[in-house]
Image (spheres, rainbow, N blue to C red):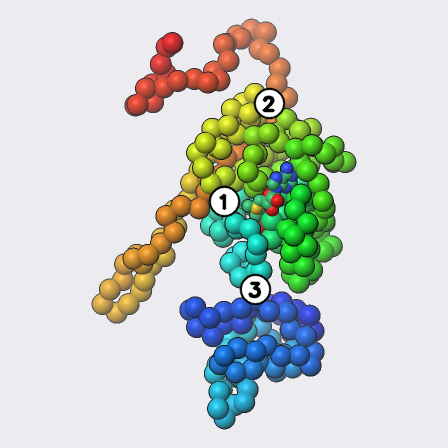
């Protein structure tokens, strides 16, 4: 996957088994201590990603650790986190529906621990940028540390800013990503930063938030408004019992997307706006 050798300060994904795995930054002369022995970073630096190392002392420990190049999904699960995180499957959908690609200009609020920020930063390279905001000092510190560890500081700025109140110096942004308690309250403000046809994506754990966000998008000239929920099932593969794993995460959150439009009234066929439409149980419009 990678053609370059592991260097001092690189982030590596150290795997012992299915449960014991760590995202660590290798530093010359330093060590990683686990209860199954010590991993010397000097054994890793200069090797290729995908190599294996053995814990010291070799005669009493000698456990095998795989050294992989971290995937964006590893940032989410294994990064130091202080807030609720976005799961990799949701991050994947966010990337697809936000249209984020190399060169994109993105605003994110809040950054939380910076897990999603790292993923966004990975995809906007080499000439895009993620401007991420949060109001909590603790989140800002953690996110900054994680961005630096992931070596993404060139593509990501972490700033103290209240997306609901502050007038931020942005325009023509490709996408706005909201993962915060009251996204609907931010929509009229962030709309100004977005370019026409730009995408707003909001991640919320509850349907109450989704409803308010959807109605706010409708009122603020967004179209193509949809909400999705992803449910991921991991498969257990065994000689005699290949099937979905018994335990799973039943709910992560809802992803609501909308596209900013230049709303102009139709002079030929103006219809009554459809907002706050009520429908029957089988989805047919209900007349008041
Ligand atoms: C659930 S966390 C975000 C987690 C993040 N997506 C991650 O991957 O780690 C929500 C964050 O929104 C921040 N927040 C809440 N209100 C905000 C506002 N008005 N402006 C900016 N950030 C805000 C909180 O401080 C918190 O860190």
Residue situated furthest front in the rendering: 137
Mark 1 CB lies closer than 8 A to ligand 1:
no
**How far apart are the two marked residues, 1 and 2, measured between alpha carbons?**
23 Å
Residue hosting label 1: 93
Task: Identify the residue at horizontal 55%, vertical 51% (top origin).
Answer: 83
Q: Quadrant of ligand 1?
A: top right
Q: Is residue 36 above or below residue 188?
A: below
Residue 220: numbered disc: 2
Counting from the top left corner in percent of width and height, residue 235 is at 33, 59
Mark with earlier residue (1, 3) = 3
Task: Identify the residue at horizontal 37%, vertical 10% (top origin).
Answer: 287
Is 155 in front, or is 278?
Answer: 278
When asked about the image quadrant of residue 42, the answer is bottom right
Residue 194: numbered disc: none
Judged from the image, the secondary structure of the residue bearing numbered disc 2 is loop
Q: Within 10 Å of the Cα at label 2, are there few (<14), some (14-19), or many (20+) other Cα atoms? A: some
Q: Is residue 29 above or below residue 94?
A: below
Mark 2 CB lies closer than 8 A to ligand 1:
no
Residue hosting label 3: 70
């Amino acid at each position: 996957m990678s053609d370059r050798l592991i260097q001092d300060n690189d982030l590596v994904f150290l795997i012992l088994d299915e449960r014991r795995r760590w995202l660590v930054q290798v530093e010359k002369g330093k060590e990683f201590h686990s209860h199954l022995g010590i991993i010397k970073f000097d054994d890793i630096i200069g090797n290729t990603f995908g190599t294996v190392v053995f814990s010291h002392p070799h005669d009493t420990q000698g456990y095998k650790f795989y050294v992989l190049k971290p995937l964006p999904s590893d940032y989410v699960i294994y990064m130091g986190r202080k807030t609720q995180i976005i799961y990799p499957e949701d991050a994947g959908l966010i990337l697809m529906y936000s249209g984020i690609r190399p060169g994109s200009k993105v605003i994110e609020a809040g950054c939380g621990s910076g897990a999603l920020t790292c993923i966004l930063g990975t995809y906007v390279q080499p000439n895009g940028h993620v401007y991420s905001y949060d109001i909590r000092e603790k989140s800002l510190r953690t996110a900054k540390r994680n961005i630096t560890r992931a070596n993404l500081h060139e593509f990501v700025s972490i700033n103290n800013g209240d997306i609901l109140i502050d007038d931020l110096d942005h325009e023509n942004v490709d996408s706005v990503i909201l993962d915060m308690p009251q996204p609907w309250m931010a929509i009229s403000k962030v709309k100004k930063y977005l370019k026409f046809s730009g995408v707003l994506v909001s991640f919320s754990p509850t349907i109450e938030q989704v409803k308010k966000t959807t109605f706010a998008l409708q009122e603020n000239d967004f179209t193509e408004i949809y909400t999705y929920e992803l449910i991921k099932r991991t498969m257990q593969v065994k000689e005699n019992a290949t099937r979905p794993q018994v335990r799973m995460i039943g709910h992560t959150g809802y992803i609501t997307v909308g596209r900013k439009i230049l709303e102009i009234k139709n002079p030929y066929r103006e219809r009554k706006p459809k907002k706050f439409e009520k429908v029957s149980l089988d989805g047919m419009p209900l007349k008041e």
